[in-house]
Image: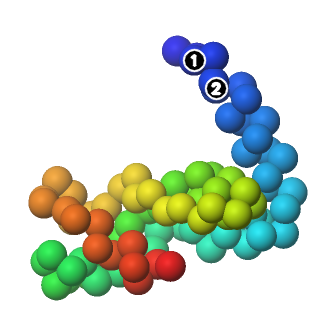
Amino acid sequence: MKTPLTNPVRVVTALCLFSPVANDVYARFREPQQVICPEENEYAAVQVDAEMAAVTAALGMPGLRIIRCTQWPRECGRGCLEELS
């Protein structure tokens, strides 16, 4: 189901991807990243929302959000985001 914000978000995403900063951020985070989970002290593969990271970087407000992790559904404080910054 499409929401009223779906198309504007896609347009902003497409426009931001032409920014060199956004391209670099998107390229860095489009593939899963290997981190050490601070809660479990084990390796984990995390997938960052690359589109959101690229858009926020292009707008000058870098932000990372994990959308998948091999350690989930365990308790997670998302402390591994510090490793990715």
Q: Secondary structure at mark 1?
A: loop
* Disc 1: CA contacts within 10 A as few (<14), some (14-19) or many (>=20): few
For the point 79% across and 52% down, which residue is it? 16
Q: Which mark is residue 3?
A: 1
Asked if 40 appears above or below 49 in the picture, the reply is: below
Q: Amino acid at mark 2?
A: Thr
Where residue 46 appears, as percent x and y from the top left, is 38, 67
Task: State left or right for residue 67 relative to residue 43.
Answer: right
Question: On the image, which quarter does residue 31 sit in?
Answer: bottom right
For the point 59% across and 52% down, which residue is it? 52
Q: CA distance from mark 2 to mark 1?
A: 5 Å
According to the picture, the residue beneath numbered tag 2 turns out to be 6
Q: Secondary structure at mark 2?
A: helix
Task: State left or right for residue 81 relative to residue 11.
Answer: left
* Disc 2: CA contacts within 10 A as few (<14), some (14-19) or many (>=20): few
Q: Amino acid at mark 1?
A: Thr
For the point 73% across and 72% down, which residue is it? 24
Where residue 30 appears, as percent x and y from the top left, is 59, 63
Question: On the image, which quarter does residue 69 sit in?
Answer: bottom left
Q: Is residue 24 visible?
A: yes
Q: Are marks 2 and 1 in contact (CB under 8 Å)?
A: yes
Where residue 10 appears, as percent x and y from the top left, is 71, 35
Q: Which mark is residue 41?
A: none
Where residue 35 appears, as percent x and y from the top left, is 35, 81
Question: On the image, which quarter does residue 42 sit in?
Answer: bottom left
Task: State left or right for residue 52 relative to residue 59.
Answer: left
User: Closest to the observer: 36 or 62?
Assistant: 62
Q: How many marks?
A: 2
For the point 40% across and 58% down, which residue is it? 66
